[in-house]
Amino acid sequence: MNSSIAQKDVAAHLHSYTNLAQAGQVEPLVIVQGDGIHVVDDRGRRYLEGMSGLWCASLGFNHPRLIAAATQALNTLPYYHTFYHRTNNAVAELAERLLAVAPAPMGKVFFANSGSEANDSAAKMVWYYHNAIGKPQKKKIIARRNAYHGVTAVAASMGGLASNHNDFDLPISTRFLHTECPHLYRNGLPGETEEAFATRLAGLLEQQILQEGPETVAAFIAEPVMGAGGVIVPPAGYFEKVQAVLRKYNVLMIADEVICGFGRTGNMFGSTTFNIQPDILTCAKGLSSAYMPISAVMVSAQVYEAIAQNSARHGRFGHGYTYSGHPVAAAVALEVLKVYEEDNIVARTRDLAPQFGGALRRLAQRRHVGEVRTIGLIGAIELVQDKEKKVGFTDGKSGVTVAQYAQEEGLIVRPLGDAVAFCPPLIIEPKQVDELFSRFDRALDRFEREIH
């Protein structure tokens, strides 16, 4: 909120918000305009958007090159599909560019419209692939508890968030399994090191595969950094140890790069940051900086060849969406990739990461900040009542309160239970990083005054 607004107006607004929240409703924030890293609501209030919308507006909210690319594409070919061996120039070029920047050798690209659709498609491809290679029993997919992979019936079933399962009758089948979340702060044993924790989690995964039967386990899906699950940065050596288990039992590795892809962790992909060698990679969000809905599934040559041969047997690959490879979305995504390259966005992220991460880590000195998690330009704090005992708040909604106070200070962040997440646009300037945390400090001041 603008600092000129009277304190009595703040109190009245917060009282109204509290009443609405208790009734299961929240007053909507109506955003009407965006520029750079800021958005403006229908009352003229200006906010620093500390979450890039939903982890996605990497280049901010009014990039002229992206607007021009969309306009030109609309004037050239506003729509065409990619069924029946048809394509368009933009999507063909985009596929080539994605394969060129992929973190591991990939064979082909399939396009969809959201991260949920990409992960849903990846699951179907895993099942189709194992049928194609004569392993029809190898269908189970393992994810992590607290993981988020989307909200379609299949994608939500793969995810490990109870809120995406409760009363939706999910997971939809016993094909979806979940293993331990790699959160050392909450799941580590007393005195356990990162490496020991990673070794133990890999061992638990292997035990689970053996209990299920390796002949039934098809794939393991993971975000390099878990986003909606609390911005969980994996312990050192975690993915190397996990992938050794996967290779031992011929289990495919799916990297969900929907949030981490395109510079967020300080490399083009989080897979590079954490030494992941995926067989299938899904991406979205930063692919178009959220200016148009588009996502992609990249598959290895091995997976593609098996799928292609099986499709020839059936006469077609019976999967796709009306808007797969939409020419306008593809044109915008192409321009986004050019901006990333020409403006050195990934290197810029690495340069800003120490300032961003340092400001976040200083919050660990706060009375009720139990843990700080950060890499690149993504991070979170975890709020606790008792730092020594790591005791969270009883209602699990402290993050909502802090995020609301931040909003009143002109900053948008995301509450995730007792955690608060940060994911600013990659174009943020150093002085804007300082402003982001200055506003958040004021929000934490208010929170601490309230509970003492």
Image (tube, grey):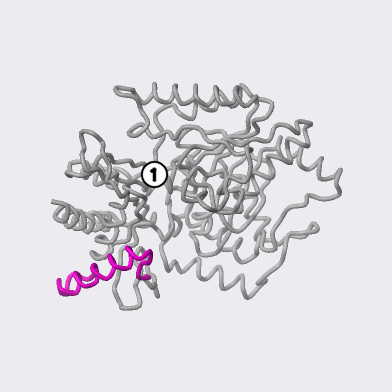
Label 1 SS: loop
Name above or below for residue 195 compared with residue 310: above
Q: Position of residue 249 (x, y in %)?
A: 63, 23
- On the image, the x and y values in percent for residue 217 come to 64, 30
**Relative side of 113 to 398, left or right:** right
Query: Is-magenta flag for residue 183?
Result: no
Q: Which residues are magenta?
A: 1-28
Give above or below for 300 relative to 339: above
Q: Is residue 291 left or right of residue 12?
A: right
Residue nearest the observer in this picture, 30 or 66: 30
Q: Quadrant of the N terminus?
A: bottom left
Q: Between residues 70 and 286, which one lies in front from this camera angle?
A: 286
* Residue 201 vertical placement versus 104 (above, below): above
Residue at the spot of label 1: 231
Residue drawn at x 47%, y 38% as measured from the top left? 145
Tell me which corner region of the image, top left, top right, bottom left or bottom right, holds residue 105: top right
* Depicted 131 relative to depicted 398: above or below: above
**Left or right for 221, reference 411:** right
Q: Quadrant of residue 14?
A: bottom left
Disc 1 marks a residue whose amino acid type is Val
At 52% from the left and 53% from the top, the residue drawn is 167
Callout 1: few (<14), some (14-19), or many (20+) C-alpha neighbours within 10 Å?
many
